[in-house]
């Protein structure tokens, strides 16, 4: 798996998580004006691996 950062048509930064089979399994859902903010969002997702899964 790998995270990919890119700029959309509005020149905002976004990310996507791509699995080994080349399918996108997650994305940022929003654009970021700064590349650093996009990278920070990726690190938040990467760091949340111990977060519980709950049913609503």
Image (cartoon, rainbow, N blue to C red):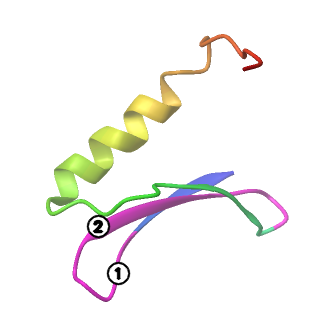
Q: Nearer the viewer, residue 52 or 23?
A: 52
Which numbered disc covers residue 28?
Answer: none
Left or right side of 18 for 48: left
Dot placed on the residue nearer the N-terminal end, 1 or 2:
1
Q: Position of residue 35 (x, y in %)?
A: 20, 59
Instruction: Place residue 50 in its image quadrant.
Output: top right
The residue that disc 2 covers is: 13
Instruction: Determine the residue located farthest toward the front in the rendered image.
Output: 56
Under circle 2, the secondary element is strand
- Which residue corresponds to the image point at 85% horizontal and 65% vertical from the top-left? 21
Residue 7, x across and y down, in percent: 32, 77
Residue holding disc 1: 8
- Tell me the crowding category of disc 2: few under 14, some 14 to 19, or many 20 or more residues within 10 angstroms, Cα based: many
**Are discs 1 and 2 less than 8 Å apart at CB?**
yes
- Percent x, y for residue 30? 37, 59
For numbered disc 1, what is the local secondary structure?
A: loop
Residue positioned most to the bottom: 9
Span of residues in magenta: 6-21
44 in relation to 4, above or below:
above
Q: Quadrant of residue 32?
A: bottom left
The verdict on residue 14 being magenta is yes
For residue 8, side relative to residue 16 (left or right): left
Q: Left or right: 40 with respect to 29? A: left
Residue 46 shown in magenta: no
- The answer to whether 25 is drawn above or below residue 12 in the figure is above
Q: Is residue 44 left or right of residue 11?
A: right
Vertical position of residue 43 compared to residue 29: above or below: above
Quadrant containing the C terminus is top right
Please name the residue shown 15% across and 63% down the image. 33
Few, some or many C-alpha atoms within 10 Å of disc 1 (few <14, some 14-19, many ≥20)?
A: few
Name the one closer to the observer, 44 or 55. Answer: 55
């Amino acid at each position: 798996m790998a995270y990919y950062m890119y700029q959309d048509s509005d020149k905002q930064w976004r990310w996507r998580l791509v699995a080994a089979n080349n399918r996108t399994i997650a994305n940022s859902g929003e654009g970021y004006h700064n590349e650093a903010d996009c990278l920070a969002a990726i690190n938040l997702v990467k760091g949340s691996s111990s977060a519980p899964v709950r049913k609503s």
